[in-house]
Amino acid sequence: MEIMRGAGFTAGVMLLVTLSLPAAAQNDLSVGRKMLVEDNPGELWIDQGKDLYYQKRGPKKASLEQCDFGMGPGKLEGAAARLPRYFADTDRVEDLESRLLTCMSTLQGFDKNEVAKKAISSPRSRGSDIEALALFITSKSNGMKVNVTLSHQKEYDAYKAGEYLFYRRSGQTDFSCDQCHGEANKRIRLQDLLHMTSAAGAQEVASTWPAYRGAHYVVRTMQWRLNDCVWQMRLPDLKYGTDYSIALTTFLNRRGNDAVIQVPGFKR
Amino acid sequence: MRQLRRQFLKLTGSASVLTAAVSAGLLKSGNALASTWNKAGFESKSVVDIQKSLGATSMTDSKNITITAPDIAENGAIVPVAVTSKIPNTQSITIIAEKNPFPLAASFEISGGGEGYVSTRVKMGQTSNVRAIVKADGKFYTAVKEVKVTVGGCG
Amino acid sequence: MAEPMKIRATLQGDTADVRILMRHPMETGTRKTSSGVVPLHFIQSVVVQHNGKTVLDVQWSQAISRDPFLGLRVKGAKLGDKISVTWTDNKGDKRTDEVSVAAGS
């Protein structure tokens, strides 16, 4: 496949993303968005996640009640607000989805790779276990402020790695996250792009996932969002729960500190 | 529907099918069966024929009907539409997406303490007028709002 | 088979603000997949009752969005009043769920 490189192509792509959204159209979108997020079909997945959390499942026939999401086993209120964070038992920084993978394998005996393979569900399906569980657990932090602390060296390292990755230009398109998400009023076709290097943009990223993705009719998580961005940037496929994704999530959530969590979000 | 037919067939022979149905718990007093689905209207491709099926051949434009919907729908498959009718004694509200293959999307019959307000989400195949028809005191009123759709939402 | 609805009924003055989320595919009968066209499958009727009395009788087409939403308001409601919702789809499947009117925020 021809590698498209060079100033001409990049400039053309830059032009596409820097067209600003007319002010009037911006108001129009907020009317519909408000109506949709107020009564979000994603809420129907919260109980699904709750059932999965309490059910004894897997080869070890155990529930997830002994899973430690950072505040001690079984403590859910406020736990998601502090993720990603360092976990001593795995000696790494984990986000919510990778922490679920850890607990589903150690407590319930599921095969991590098998769970990861099914973690991103098909559109119009019942959704994956991870999607429902991630929503249920994050909903226990609804109304609370995002509070990612960088108190462990590895947490700080993850943050710095995420920052580096956010600005690094990669692959055949020479894209960085920054090019789409580093300026105000950018869009791709009609889709406005979050200005993530602003406080408001970072706060929205940190507080609205997991979210109901209207076009897919299922709940999606941040792991999916990063997976999709990486795909759109024409980079190699992002494996589920890797340090790459956890680093970016640490960077973005930390930048979004003090945002009030309200899930499920609603995305087009 | 099959369930209902079986129960009715069992009841023939009783003095009154209706009383028998009530005692069988099918028609609890104050708990009417749902209205008959307006097949003619829902399967029609013409807004004029839909109006006929509603008995609304003559309608007056009314500023007392508010259609709340986005000017531009980000996803044509999930377009939020709310209709508020301030017309006294509103009996029903109907929502039509004029350019849909089957324009009649929803019909709401209001009774008891129900207010003249309904909200739902519709699929729109393309940019079109969303029309609300309100029946109040036996008369028909209407309002429209254009909703732009960039990618259709019917598939 | 029919999944539970999510119903919120909150009192605003003497009006109950009722919001209902239902889980249903609402298939239009025109969607093609690799295994053929998905058949028509949608909620045709929704009946909402307030303390046993019908306040809203809804007829829907397949043009109502997947995982459909219904919002309505009921005058003359009080805390603890029963709001009951029943949907029926074109295959004859039914689901009824009920909540009590709660205080508004």
Image (spheres, grey):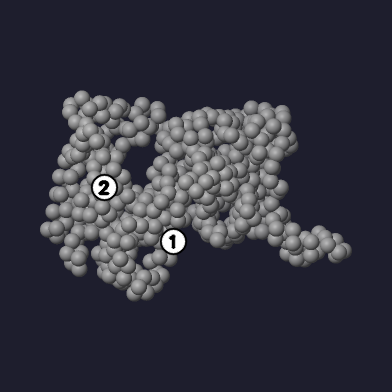
Judged left or right of residue C10, residue A263 is: left
Quadrant assignment for the C terminus of chain A: top left
Quadrant assignment for the N terminus of chain A: top left
Q: What is the crowding at mark 2: few (fewer than 14 residues within 10 Å), some, or many (at least 20)?
A: few
Mark 1 = which residue? A48
What amino acid is at disc 2? Asp
Judged left or right of residue A4, residue C98 is: right
Residue A172: image quadrant is top left
| Percent x, y of residue A262 | 36, 51
Mark 2, secondary structure of its residue: loop
Mark 2 = which residue? A237
- The answer to which of B63 and C69 lies nearer the viewer is C69
Residue A140: image quadrant is bottom left
- Distance, label 1 to label 2, CA atoms, is 29 Å
Q: Which mark is residue A154?
A: none
Are circles 1 and 2 on residues that touch, CB within 8 Å?
A: no
Mark 1, secondary structure of its residue: helix
Residue at the spot 30% in from the left edge and 66% down from the top edge: A111
| Percent x, y of residue A265 | 38, 48
What amino acid is at disc 1? Gln
| Percent x, y of residue B18 | 81, 59
- The answer to which of A174 and A263 lies nearer the viewer is A174
Residue at the spot 71% in from the left edge and 37% down from the top edge: B54
* Label located before the other in sequence (1 or 2): 1
Q: Nearer the viewer, mark 1 or mark 2?
A: 2
| Residue furthest out toward the left | A153
- The answer to which of A242 and A96 lies nearer the viewer is A242
Q: Is residue B51 above or below residue C84?
A: above
Residue at the spot 79% in from the left edge and 65% down from the top edge: B10
Give a yes or no on whether discs 1 and 2 share a subunit: yes
Residue at the spot 50% in from the left edge and 40% down from the top edge: B155
| Percent x, y of residue B9 | 79, 61
